[in-house]
Amino acid sequence: MEFSQYPVDALLKITNRPDLVFTEGQGMWLTDHQGKRYLDYLQGWAVNCLGHSPQCLQDALVKQAAKVINPSPAFYNEPSIELAALLTENSCFDRVFFANSGAEANEGAIKLARKWGKLNKNAAGEARYEIITFNHGFHGRTLATMSASGKTGWDTIFAPQVPGFPKAELNDIASVERLITDKTVGVMLEPVQGEGGVLPATREFMQALRKLTQERGLLLIVDEVQAGMGRTGELFAYQLSGIEPDIMTLGKGIGGGVPLSALLCREEFAVFEPGDQGGTYNGNPLMTAVGAAVLKELLAPGFLQSVKDKGQYLRGELLKLCEKHSLDGERGEGLLRALKLGSNIGAQIVDIARDMEPVGLLLNSPRSDLLRFMPALNVTKEEIDQMISMLSEILGKIKG
Ligand SMILES: *Cc1c(COP(=O)(O)O)cnc(C)c1O
């Protein structure tokens, strides 16, 4: 294993990694241990919203590290107050709890919903705790968030599951309505299912869901860990459908690459009491300072419009590829897009793309007949053109 001076076997094997070590990252580019460069359309799985190591992130880390890193969540710190203020000023939410990962933010959302369901009991005087979630949804890898997820097989791997997450079908309001019982407290979904293969909830569905949850006294929880923070061209994906949810979670893009996530809620649902929620690193100033720096970049005049424009451009180029290579089309919102390959060549393309010379291309295939694109939000038109031309070359070879 010449790519590292240490034995890689010391790492617990959780995925099949290629024999590469990435040593540097800048914008849309990663460099490996041999100096080979890769155009990176993964960006840490839609995490590095401003690309690898953007200047604003480096500055925020260095400046904050020299000031104070961890006074403890038992005390206020300036960056977390600032970031919470920025998030609430720019959304329909009033309160924020910071966490370290998307799964942890979602656990918090589930706890908040269950607490609210305990305070707002059903007609029989019982606590409500069921949260309707969706087939093919993804909410994280803790036990509760795995149970909330709708990935095939996830109900049995670490059985028994955490109960209370019946599954509906995305964009099928009747399938949600059918699952409502006197135990239901809310509905939780990704406005665009990311891991499930970039499946957007329609505007009509989101509006019907908001109406239904309001009528039945249920919480509407949006998991924007992947789709939030400018990814769709709106700051938050719920804004695409003109509705206002009750609870939202953020992760990935909010830290621009560092571990940071958030749980947001409207004032009337802010029912945690001291002792209900916490965590050693939550809201630490080092990460929240980065979050504030990232969010300010996203809010700069013209930034979100440029995401929309580049999303449209990428869409157009993907459609041209479809024409040229007889593929099945594309879908997505903003700069979270998928190309439908029409056959199970996803994994093959990912491997060929990575191994191309002189520069490689990093792609993701969440399903065997699909490629997902999650570039930095400040990707350039040239970097889109370069990816499309490399992909076209690969498709030409595979499809003959
Ligand atoms: C990635 C993701 C999560 C989990 O986030 P982690 O930081 O990996 O825990 C949850 N929900 C959605 C929609 C995601 O894309």
Image (cartoon, rainbow, N blue to C red):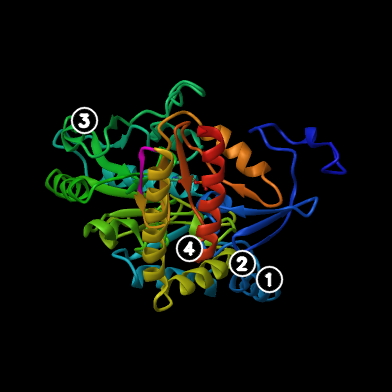
| Mark with earlier residue (3, 4) | 3
Residue occupying the point 48% across, 37% down? 366
Q: Is residue 243 left or right of residue 83?
A: left
Q: Which range is magenta?
A: 327-331
Q: Nearer the viewer, residue 25 or 58?
A: 25
The location of residue 109, given as percent across then percent down, is 38, 48
Q: Identify whether 137 is placed above or below 382.
A: above
Relative depth, front residue between 138 and 221: 138
Does label 1 or label 4 sit earlier along the sequence? Answer: 1
* Residue type highlighted by circle 1: Ala
Cβ(mark 2) to ligand 1 < 8 Å? no
Instruction: Give residue 304's position: percent from left, percent from top.
Output: 39, 69
* Residue 328 belongs to the span the image colors magenta: yes
Q: Earlier in the sequence, mark 3 or mark 1?
A: 1
Which residue in the structure is indicated by mark 2? 286
Q: Circle 4 is placed at which residue position?
A: 377
Any part of residue 260 in sight: no
Label 3 sits on residue = 179
x, y percentage for residue 204?
17, 48
Task: Say what secondary structure mark 2 lies in.
Answer: helix
